[in-house]
Amino acid sequence: MAKKSEIVGMKELERSIKKLGRVPQTVATKAAVAGARIAWRAAKRNAPVEDGDLKGGIIMKGERRVKVGKKMYDIMMDPSKNDIFVKISKDGKRSYYPASQEYGFMTVDGGYVPGYQYMRKSIVENSHEIESKIVEVAAKAIDKVLSER
């Protein structure tokens, strides 16, 4: 069953966007960065403490702009640190450390160690805060653009 949620301030933001016409790229970028930063900080905070490289490897990367007025950010592991994160066992099997910490792994004796799900929790537990921050920043940026016109 779908979950219904109400984003506070969304109707006012929609009215402002209609007045503005098209959303400037700067507004979309500011709002997306503000929301992504919350998830990025939470992912770093939730990452297992045993390995400091894991916390340092979490980055926020913007996607290439395809559509004007749209901006998205990925919270992901830094690809330049793959040499640190990829572990190769004696029998030649490769394992990706951040994935094993996120999703869990099988032990040598056949047991299962559940994952921390630190990346998933950074989004799920902060979804309301992220939505609110995006709306707040976008509304301020649109009001600023409207007042300049």
Image: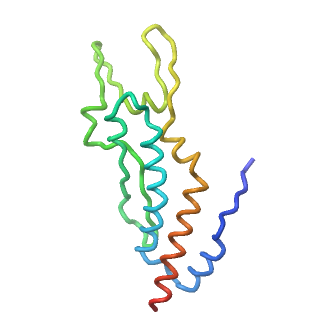
Q: Is residue 117 above or below residue 111?
A: below
> What residue is shown at x 46% (from left), y 22% (from top)?
105
The total number of labels drawn is 0
Q: Is residue 90 above or below residue 48?
A: above
> What residue is shown at x 64% (from left), y 77% (from top)?
12
Along the viewing direction, whichever of 130 and 112 lies nearer the viewer: 130
Along the viewing direction, whichever of 132 and 93 lies nearer the viewer: 132
Q: Is residue 148 above or below residue 122?
A: below
Which residue lies most toward the bottom here?
A: 149
> What residue is shown at x 62% (from left), y 80% (from top)?
15
Q: Position of residue 111 (x, y in %)?
A: 51, 12
Q: Is residue 25 above or below residue 41?
A: below
Q: Position of residue 126 (x, y in %)?
A: 57, 50
Q: Position of residue 71 (x, y in %)?
A: 43, 64
Q: Position of residue 102 (x, y in %)?
A: 47, 33
Along the viewing direction, whichever of 82 and 132 lies nearer the viewer: 132
- Indicate the quadrant where residue 99 lies: top left
Side (left or right) of 57 relative to 12: left
Q: How is the image coloured?
A: rainbow
- Indicate the quadrant where residue 86 lies: top left
> What residue is shown at x 39% (from left), y 45% (from top)?
76
Which residue lies most toward the top here?
A: 109
Side (left or right) of 75 relative to 91: right
Which residue lies most toward the right here?
A: 1
